[in-house]
Image: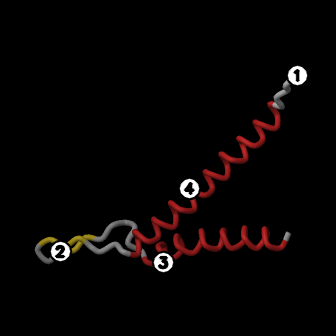
Amino acid sequence: MKITIDAGKIFKVLWRTIITMLLIYSLVFTFLTGIKILNAKPWCLDGVCISGALDDPLFGWVCLLVPLMVIAVILYRIIRN
């Protein structure tokens, strides 16, 4: 009995899995960054308040909405096909 292993198929599945994991990780990270930005409060000491570079609410909303839109497009394409 001869067993053959198709390295091309294994590599293709492995490559697709790695790319999918990276895409999901980046979407989740961007979404969580948006939540962190929207929850940011200025740091105050003796009446002097310092805000961070990422305290912009518009940037926070963009970080929240972009991953949701990408997921919506992916789901739309999956459902449509």
Name the residue that disc number 4 marks. 25
Residue, x 59% and y 68% (percent of image)? Answer: 67
Q: CA distance from mark 2 to mark 4?
A: 37 Å
Name the residue that disc number 1 marks. 2
Name the residue that disc number 2 marks. 48
Q: Tell me the quadrant of the picture where the C terminus can be found.
A: bottom right
What kind of residue is marked 2?
Val
For marks 3 and 2, the one nearer the N-term is: 2
Q: CA distance from mark 3 to mark 1?
A: 61 Å
Q: CA distance from mark 3 to mark 4?
A: 22 Å
For marks 2 and 1, the one nearer the N-term is: 1
> Viewer-proximal residue, 43 or 23?
23
Q: CA distance from mark 3 to mark 2?
A: 24 Å
Q: Tell me the quadrant of the picture where the N terminus can be found.
A: top right
Tell me where residue 38 appears, x and y as whole percent: 41, 75
**Which numbered disc, 3 or 4, marks the residue closer to the eye?**
4
> Viewer-proximal residue, 59 or 1?
1
Residue, x 65% and y 73% (percent of image)? Answer: 69
State how many labels appear.
4
**Which numbered disc, 3 or 2, marks the residue closer to the eye?**
3
Decide: few, some or many residues near mark 2? Use Cα within 10 Å; few <14, some 14-19, many ≥20.
few
Decide: few, some or many residues near mark 4? Use Cα within 10 Å; few <14, some 14-19, many ≥20.
few
What kind of residue is marked 1?
Lys
For marks 3 and 4, the one nearer the N-term is: 4
